[in-house]
Amino acid sequence: MINKIKEHLKKIEVLTATTAEEIEKIRIEYLGKKGVFKDLMDDFKQLENKLKPEMGKAINELKSSVQEKLEKLKSSQKVSSGKSKNTLDLSRPAGETEAGSRHPISIVRQQIIDIFSRIGFTVSEGPEIEDDWHNFSALNFPKEHPARDMQDTFFLDKNQELALRTHTSSVQVRVMENENPPIRTISPGRVFRNEAISARAHCIFHQVEGLYIDKDVSFADLKQTLLYFAREFFGEETEIRLRPSYFPFTEPSAEMDIYWGLNSEADYRITKGTGWLEIMGCGMVDPNVLKSNGIDPNVYSGYAFGMGIERIAMLKYQVKDLRMFFENDVRFLKQFSSAY
Ligand code: PHE
């Protein structure tokens, strides 16, 4: 009998079970009505009295080791069923991770920066909150001049000394203050205007403005640079034209259009039937602006230009409503992927 018990002890030690049914089977095999213990107890009853204490002890030990084993099996079963079974499948491919993509405005901004970097333009940045001097006065907007109304401004104080910048020309003023010509820089950044939000306008948008100051800079340099940009961005065949315009900080001033074509009904709508699309403002830096910023207009001349990134991105991606760029709807944003 003692050998029988020892054998059972060994067997119990190596028992395994992973499902609840298997565990229950083991319990019945040992503790059930017709189980191992029932048999052992029957044998026990037949024993001589003097053997009973030793056998009783052995049977009790066996019983507690069965119970311990059952507990162990149950708790390890709980752990493995608590986790999903799949986590144990080491060969399963990892779940997809959403990597996200760049915002279309960032993509276009970077493309514009790349195009101008290739011809030697540096990138300058400046504060979004500006004082009157950097946003207006240094750019030849006299106080009370109606030209200030061209850019509906969010002022930050009663005296209208501080405002959210209305263009990144303010950054170029800071560059002129701190550097000597030759200056060749672009300033990408966020700008603010107090405009009603619609499909074509927003109170926050992004610009890239450029400034080139050196000896003998001419209008021909400006035109060639803008042609280079237009062809790099919109394609080799792109045609441009410059129309006279007005900005306080440039003289002469112009607006640059690209020839978009009239191939579809939409082309008629977006070009108002002309085939031409306005892309940016530009001109020769007004001598007053050079003077205000400590640069001698008798020695130096320069050109400047500025464009809205949203407008360029709308054309590139055929986006009809500018507000889409600000809503952060992932269904919209997911559609843009790029090496940038
Ligand atoms: N600063 C002008 C604007 O915001 C754009 C511009 C820049 C025009 C440089 C001419 C020269 O509208």
Image (tube, rainbow, N blue to C red):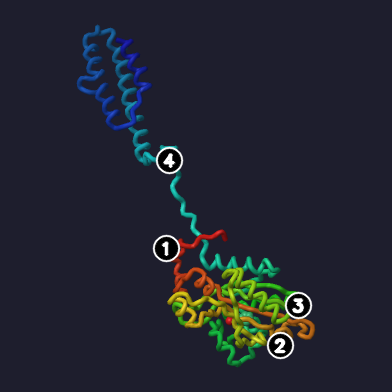
Q: Of label 2 and label 3, which has the lower sequence position?
A: 3
Q: Toward the viewer: 85 or 297?
A: 297
Give the image quarter of residue 220.
bottom right
Return the disc, 1 or 3, that comes first in the chain's sequence: 3
Residue position for label 4: 92
Q: Amino acid at mark 4?
A: Arg
Q: Are marks 1 and 2 in contact (CB under 8 Å)?
A: no
26, above or below 314, in the image: above
Residue of label 3: 214
Q: Amino acid at mark 2?
A: Asn
Find disc 2 in the rendering and name its residue.
288
Q: Position of residue 115 (x, y in %)?
A: 63, 67
Q: Which residue is labeled 1 in the image?
A: 331
Local secondary structure at mark 4: loop
Distance from the alpha carbon under mark 1 to that under mark 4? 29 Å
Q: Is mark 3 within 8 Å of ligand 1?
A: no
Residue lying at 30% horizontally and 19% vertically, measured from the top left: 60
* Residue 339 in view (yes/no): yes
**Residue 71 percent across, percent down from the top left:** 33, 30
| Viewer-side label of 3, 4 | 3
Q: CA distance from mark 3 to mark 4?
A: 63 Å
Q: Tell me: 317 left or right of 218.
A: left
Q: Residue at x 77, y 80 (%)?
A: 216
